[in-house]
Image (cartoon, rainbow, N blue to C red):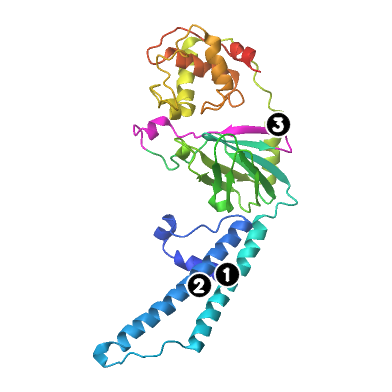
Amino acid sequence: MVSLFRVLGASVLFLPALAIAQINMPSGVTPVSHEIYDLHMMVFWIVVAILAVVYGVVIYTLVNHRKSKGVVAATFSENTTVEIIWTIIPLLIITAILVPSIRVLIDMDDFDAAELTVKVTGHQWKWQYEYLEHGVGFFSNLSTPVAQMVGVDKKNEWYLLEVDKPLVLPTNRKVRFVLTSNDVIHSWWVPELGIKRDAVPGYVYEGWARIEEPGTYRGQCAELCGVGHGFMPVVVEAVDPQAFDVWIRKLASAVPSVASDQGWTLPTAMERGAVLYDQHCAVCHKIDGSGMPPTFPALTNSSIATSTDVNRHVDLVLHGVPHTAMQAYAPQFDNEELAAIITYERNAWGHNTGDLVLPSQIQAQRR
């Protein structure tokens, strides 16, 4: 029966153009995504059959019972047999949909016997991934160049669907996801994995996947979460288990960078800071630093960016401002990255303070 629905589903996309246009939902690469697709196609063909019967009866009635043919309208007001029929048939249809639907829902919540657990945390506007068994993790940020966003450069194939660090997972292993949020409600959605789970502050939701084919699978945040909602894509890279084991060992053994001021110059910091600012800060404070007050204050000529108290600026970027949209960036960037961003903010847009923030200064103010 399942294979029949897959064949029927494939027939809907017999033209390559329709497949490219994504007229139908994908079958996916996990057991749950296959079950969801089969259920979708079963309901689709049931609806098609109902429409065919209903419209067939309507067309037949219009053609064969019109007044011009001398047909006289019936005068009865009820028919017990018909009422029994149109009660039983919908009940059978609903039962036919209900049983496989419950089975799919049960399978979607089967989190037991997972071989790997990944904690997914939504932030405005990026994802944080933590491999709980290995004690390592990272932030995944949009990597689409700002020049494409503002229309200066031509948009590439994966515009707004590319990240600096994808979530790497092994194929043919059961992976359990635990999802939450650091600020507002987000939703982690990867269609080809058959997963869409809300990430809610203060709550933990679960999902799971066993990816059957290696490849790159893309998704997005599916919950309107603020001005940067369209800028937090999901990219999952599925590799064979051996390659994953090598990758995770390398990630776990990586030595954190030590704060070093050697070779750190103002031109170097400004060049690197400009790139980092455009990628991570411009979505709120805008490329020219004008911000979007009052939620996202302007940095141009601000008391923070032009103050003689550099440590105040460093502290704000490192630890954020509680109960505001300004989050803490200490866990997200290393010392050199933060030093570059702050140096850029203190010397861009005509500020020209001449301040060079050193990586050692950042290290000294980390808590």
Query: Which tag is nearer the camera, tag 1 or tag 3?
Result: 1
Binning the other alpha carbons within 10 Å of mark 1 as few (below 14), some (14 to 19) or many (20 upward) gives some
Which range is magenta?
Answer: 132-154
Q: Secondary structure at mark 3?
A: helix
Seen in the picture, residue 194 relative to 89 is either above or below; the reply is above
Looking at the rendered structure, the kind of residue marked 1 is Ile
Q: Which residue is mark 3?
A: 252
Q: Which mark is residue 97?
A: 1
User: Between residues 29 and 288, which one lies in front from this camera angle?
Assistant: 288
179 within the magenta span: no
Seen in the picture, residue 95 relative to 246 is either above or below; the reply is below
Binning the other alpha carbons within 10 Å of mark 3 as few (below 14), some (14 to 19) or many (20 upward) gives few
149 to the left or right of 191? left
Looking at the rendered structure, the kind of residue marked 3 is Ala
Q: Position of residue 355 (x, y in %)?
A: 48, 8
205 to the left or right of 115? left
* C-alpha gap between disc 2 and disc 3: 51 Å
152 to the left or right of 95? left
User: Which of the two discs, 2 and 3, labels the residue nearer the N terminus?
Assistant: 2
Whether residue 264 is visible, yes or no, is no
Q: Which residue is mark 2?
A: 46
Circle 2/circle 3 CB separation < 8 Å: no
Residue found 59% across the figure and 55% down from its top: 29
